[in-house]
Amino acid sequence: MYYGRDHIPGKDENACGGIIKAQDLQSFYPNRKDQPNILYLISSALPAYAATMVRQAKKHGAKIVLNQNGTAYPAWHGPGWEKTNRPMRKVLELADYVFYQSQFCKTAADLHLLERNDGFEILHNPVDCSTFVPSQYKPTGHRLISAGTHNQLYRVQCAIETAVILKRSIPDIQLTFAGRYHWQNSHAESMGELEALVENSGIAGSITVLGPYSQNEVVPLMQDHHIALHTKYNDPCPRLVTEALACGLPVVYSDSGGVPELVGRDAGIGVPAPQDWQDLHAPAPDHLAEAVVKVFERYDAFSAAARQRSIEHLDVGPWLERHKQVFTEIIR
């Protein structure tokens, strides 16, 4: 098995996004560059010259498996989205089998890349429910976390404005940001802008800004909070949502993209949003705040449902088993 890059970050290294799927797999299928019989690529972490790599791999008899995340489209990417999609389109066309991370991912790929009619399935991003577990003791107060890769400014603005509204009725509300920040030219520049927004929010003492984290740091980070606040519009299949659910955190989110597929009916509350490829629809902070209040009112039930959802639908065990079955079938 080769994942298209020589180094896959370990769980003690700062990493997030698509490459985490390779972490799940490489314990069972080590990363080997020399004569692999399967090239496993993740659309959101494609190597340079991915299409050329795929052609060479197929020429030497390897099978191609693609884990397809979202696509570029006008509202998210802006001008040039078609060019960004070209490498994904070619890999999708040449793949022997495709795992779409959500039905939303399949819909996006059908519209913006190409439509596959066979050799695919929907398989949501997993979480190891034996490692990601609820804390025996919940933290005091009312603590929200917004984590992951923050690549658009509106995401953090919505979260801050939501916390400002909540502060009026929940005086001890706390909001934590964690992850990478990439709406400016660099992480440092983006993080500096976020810190300035926090300072000018009027509730700076209630907001904490943390940087990137490793997989080993996610569990205590989640366990130190009550609710995951996910403000991204049309998020295809965010790993951090599965991790939050497994740790017993209900999710308040934009009811768009693939997130509703992950959360289900009982493990959180989605703020209504239209499906739109041309314009971005940031969730209204007052609606997010209202949803947070509702979750806190029935917190124990929401938290139990979040954990149950992860065990029944998102655990890494069945995800790995399905990969094993597909790998066995395609290399016969």
Image: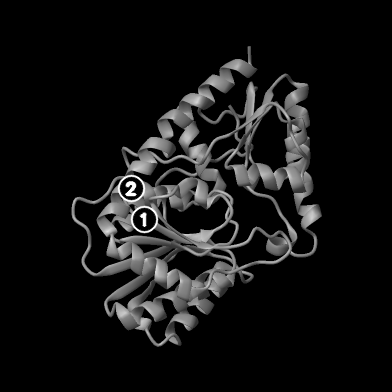
Q: Amino acid at mark 2?
A: Ala
Q: Which label sits on residue 56?
A: none
Residue placed under numbered mark 1 in the picture: 250
- Helix, strand or loop at label 1? It is loop
**Residue 253 drawn above or below residue 173:** above
Observer able to see residue 45: no
User: The N terminus appears in which quarter of the rendering?
Assistant: top right
Considering depth in this image, is 147 or 285 the residue closer to the camera? 285
Q: Residue at x 60, y 16 (%)?
A: 329
- Find residue 185 and report its image quarter: bottom right
- At label 1, which amino acid type do we have? Pro
Report the residue at 22% width, 58% height from top.
138
Is 70 situated left or right of 196 in this image? right
Residue 178's spot in the image, x, y percent? 43, 64
Q: From the viewer's side, name the closer residue of 117 and 287.
A: 287
Q: Quadrant of residue 140?
A: bottom left
Where 260 falls versus 178 (above or below)? above
Residue 118 vs residue 304: left or right? right
The image shows residue 31, relative to residue 199, as above or below, that is: above
User: Which of disc 1 and disc 2 is earlier in sequence?
Assistant: 1
Query: How far apart are the two marked residues, 2 and 1, measured between alpha carbons?
Result: 8 Å
Question: Which residue corresponds to the image point at 31% horizontal and 37% vertical from the top-left?
Answer: 130
User: Looking at the image, do the residues carrying marks 2 and 1 touch, with CB atoms under 8 Å apart?
Assistant: yes
251, above or below 42, in the image:
below
- Residue 305 got which mark? 2
Residue at the image position 18 percent from the left and 55 percent from the top = 137
